[in-house]
Image (cartoon, helix red, strand yellow):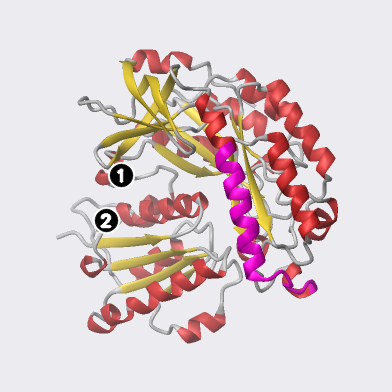
Amino acid sequence: MSKKYHFWISGCQMNYADARQVATGLEKLGYRPTLEADEANVIILQTCTVRQQAEDKAFGRLQSLRPLKEKNPDLTLAMMGCVVGVKGNKSLEKKFPYVDVWMPPATDGMPLISHLLQNDDFIADERETDHRHAVQDEDIVLSQNIKANQVSAPVAVVYGCSHACSFCIIPNRRGIERTRAVGEILAEVRSLVAHGVREVVLLGQIVDRYGKDVSDGPDLADLLRVVHGVEGLNRIRFLTSHPNYMTDKILSAVADLPKVMPQIEVPIQAGDDAVLERMKRGYSVQQYRELIHRIREIVPEASIHNDIIVGFPGESRRQFQGTYDLIKELEFDKVHIARYSPRPGTVSSRKFVDVVPDEEKRYRFHALDSLQKSISIKKTRQWLDKNVEVLVEDKHKGRWRGRTPQGKLVFLDDNRDLRGELVDVHITFTGPWSMSGEAITKKTRSQQLSQSIPLTTI
């Protein structure tokens, strides 16, 4: 009888990519996933600490698991991710002594695997398998439920960050910037495609800095061209970009490579130079404005997504108005808005006092949200009564759901099994956040793969 593992995951796509690495190790030891924590022999919490709310949620979940651990002492309870951090967290280990394994972000699962092996807590199959080797090789193993459902998968290409914006806790928790080798990334992408994945999302805290820590190494544009050659892969996305490192070479790769989707996530965070300086972002509003114009010149069909923090320490109403006016001027396809909250260990928490009242932060949040809604309505309306290619990912409330090359969410009704298929859809309805339409054709697999080009070597 096989043993089971249960994952609880919060936070960004990088956390999901990390969790997949750990799940692969467990799958190779004979463990199988379960959605029910009380059925599991191993429970792993993958945590986020970007905001206090996310951290509190992780601790709440951990507390809720204590009765299970007390009832079954043989249960292995592991905690990983940014709450743990690359340096570990001794205070947490003292506070939660019933946690068996603490794992930093970007782990391959070896701390957990070692714990299980040392306790003989794994299932050996009838073959004489070298389990340690099986865990360490590069093949991704997806469970049957994921194989049947996962169409788009995140792939980490840069771990950590060395830019150190004053508000960001990531360098403290995920460590300095480390680039993954091209061959390692390719092996993971090929393995995912072999398991049915049709789209990969290349991830980095600053993905444009891929290769910057490697002397004479490939950059992100080079990586995009190599991944583009993977047979069976339909689409490639990448995030998150930074204005300082988004180059014309990267944009040209997006424009030239059919599989690389025209979706750019390049946050400004604030529309005022003084606030940007306190944030340690390293550019001016005018430089950012020029970058957006350059993106639209090189990749005219690109959708551009943005991140904004409102209520950064010392941000006046006039400075906030600069952010509002910039969003109104540049008309982004999507804007992620967050209210500033100080995070322990960041420069801003030590250097600045959080003086903007929460009520004011909420006012600014809703003002931007309302503005962006009106812009999004205008943006999506241009697709009405037009045909667009959609990669169908899954079903949601009985309707198929997928995305356009620009990342626009599309719903459609169809009796066929469209999961993982490229479908031409005629758009019949547009709203601020999604669209609906009717399937015109479902492309054959040979048509979907016709965009492949010979593998580029670098």
Q: Is 63 placed left or right of 215 in the picture?
A: left
The amino acid type found where label 1 is placed reads Ile
Say which of 342 and 360 sits in front. Answer: 360
Say which of 453 and 357 sits in front. Answer: 357
Task: Looking at this view, name the residue that lies furthest to the left.
Answer: 1
The picture places residue 48, in percent across and down from the top left corner, at: 51, 63
Residue 300 falls in image quadrant: top right
The picture places residue 367, in percent across and down from the top left corner, at: 62, 52
The picture places residue 76, in percent across and down from the top left corner, at: 32, 72
The residue under label 1 is 146
Is 451 above or below relative to 210?
above
Query: Looking at the image, which residue is at 33% across and 54% down?
Result: 130
Query: Looking at the image, which residue is at 74% across and 51% down?
Result: 270
Residue 124 falls in image quadrant: bottom left
The amino acid type found where label 2 is placed reads Pro
- Stretch in magenta: 351-374
Q: In the drawing, what numbered circle is on residue 33?
A: 2
Say which of 285 and 90 sits in front. Answer: 285
